[in-house]
Image (tube, rainbow, N blue to C red):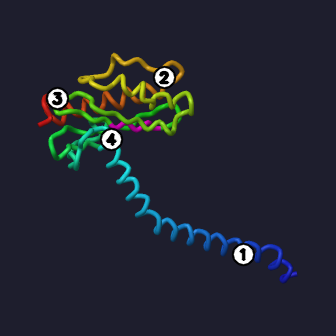
Amino acid sequence: MKSELFREMIRPVLVLTVICIAAAALLGAVNAWTDPIITENARVKAEATRKEVLPGAGSFTEVQCDRQALDITGAYKEDGGLGYVITSSHKGYGGQVVVTVGISPEGAIVGLSADVSTETSGIGSKAGREDYIARFLGLSGNCNAVDTITNATYSSTAVKNGVNAALAAFKAITGGGSGQ
């Protein structure tokens, strides 16, 4: 009776416990091994995006500011004086839309990248297309004149909110005028 209880009840619980501990240990080891690689890849991708939205940029220095108050996720000044790159993240339909804006020293948008990979393919993803992004180039102050995209209102509004947050942050960081 006791042997049967062990074989039918306790033994399977012990085996599953050992399997779970082994799986957790392996997952922890893989995470520890891959985490630095993932972090470095994210850093390289962010640097490439900054250089993409601020043509001719070399290196950047992070601007210390109250990101939460400015509704942004990062602000960088190009070391050669070409301008600023400001990143923000706003809620779209399918998730967060990360917007990276290149701004000239005079406050005009010179480049824009919108990561709409979390949005519905073919609908919300329209907010990341070049023809929509081009509507923002050259603007300064705000982008309220840019219309949202029909059937992609949440996604295109997230892009607009990101751009407006970046422009407002630029104004706050530079004191409202030139970024030099």
On the image, which quarter does residue 171 sit in? top left
Q: Residue 57 in magenta? A: no
Image height of 99 relative to 47, above or below:
above
Mark 4 surroundings: few (<14), some (14-19) or many (≥20) residues within 10 A: some
* Cα distance between the residues tagged 1 and 4: 53 Å
- Callout 3–callout 1 Cβ contact below 8 Å: no
Mark 2 nearby-residue class (10 Å; few <14, some 14–19, many ≥20): some
Which residue lies under the disc numbered 2? 153
Q: Which mark is residue 122?
A: none
Magenta region, residue range: 96-100
Residue bearing mark 3: 106
Mark 1 lies on residue: 15
Question: Label 1: how many residues lie within 10 Å, few (<14), some (14-19) or many (20+)?
Answer: few
The image shows residue 20, relative to residue 152, as above or below, that is below
**Residue labelled with disc 4:** 52
- Disc 2 or disc 1, which is closer to the eye? 2
Lower sequence index among marks 1 and 4 = 1
Dot placed on the residue nearer the N-terminal end, 3 or 2: 3
Amino acid type at image mark 4? Glu
Whole-number angstrom distance, CA of label 3 to CA of label 1: 67 Å
In the displayed structure image, the side of residue 75 where residue 120 appears, left or right: right
